[in-house]
Image: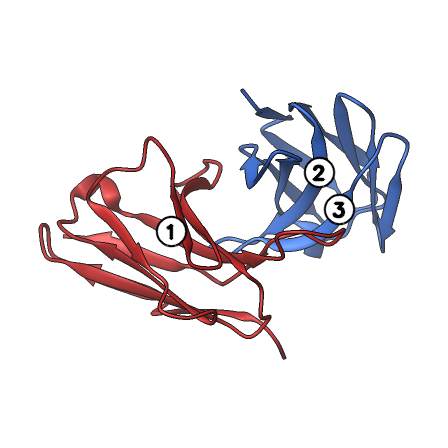
Amino acid sequence: DAMVIQNPRYQVTQFGKPVTLSCSQTLNHNVMYWYQQKSSQAPKLLFHYYDKDFNNEADTPDNFQSRRPNTSFCFLDIRSPGLGDAAMYLCATSRQQGLNTEAFFGQGTRLTVV
Amino acid sequence: EDQVTQSPEALRLQEGESSSLNCSYTVSGLRGLFWYRQDPGKGPEFLFTLYSAGEEKEKERLKATLTKKESFLHITAPKPEDSATYLCAVQAKSWGKLQFGAGTQVVVTP
């Protein structure tokens, strides 16, 4: 089935040690998003891509970076994870235009910082 | 600034006890309003998109409605498997990103 796949599902990293989360999609959507979700909170948009055009939210810390080498893959890099970065990280995709612009999410990566 | 407020924060229902969740929003030009279901430890699962006031969508025991200021998700005769957090999100015409509410956590007991 076409879907959004995130790897790994669970990631444990040490304080300050760089970590990369990955997302792939088979929906051929041109928009990809990274959201951060902490317990009992709304998903918070970190950045998104329209094709290769990168859009950073104003309040996304510099510690967070992203790469999208092609339509299918997107990566979230956390350069120096702090304890406050422990969260669920959600990747989503959507069409940019037309009627059906709903976002489809992956299962998320639960990041623990020790 | 686009805002989405969901109420109540939590809802506990007996199996078969119908209820409604509210999503109030302010957005400059609505492209779409979306409802998602999220189970613990998983990503949100898409349920419905509503585009204009007066529109309704149904799926099994769920029915979503939309006005110019709010949306309701009605749960009719819920079952324990309907227990989840229900998220509402809006998308502005001028800006493609989804602005989410904090969700309503629904627990349905047998």
Q: Give x and y (percent) for residue B92.
A: 64, 33
Secondary structure beneath dot 3 equals strand
**Which chain is disc 2 placed on?**
B
Callout 1 touching callout 2 (CB < 8 Å): no
- Residue under label 1, please give it: A88
Q: Give x and y (percent) for residue A36.
A: 39, 45
Drawn colour of chain A? Answer: red
Which amino acid is tagged 2? Leu
Viewer-nearest residue: B29 or B99: B29
- Mark closer to the chain start, 3 or 2: 2
- Residue under label 2, please give it: B33
Drawn colour of chain B? Answer: blue
Q: How is the image coloured?
A: by chain
Q: Residue at x 54, y 20 (%)?
A: B1
Q: CA distance from mark 1 to mark 2?
A: 23 Å
Secondary structure beneath dot 1 equals strand
- Residue under label 3, please give it: B49
Which amino acid is tagged 3? Thr
Same chain, labels 1 and 2: no
Q: Is residue A42 left or right of residue B32?
A: left
Instruction: State the mark number for residue B98.
Output: none
Same chain, labels 3 and 2: yes
Q: On the image, which quarter does residue A27 sit in? A: bottom right
**Which chain is disc 3 placed on?**
B
- Front: mark 1 or 2: 2
Q: Is residue A28 left or right of residue A89?
A: right
Callout 3 touching callout 2 (CB < 8 Å): yes
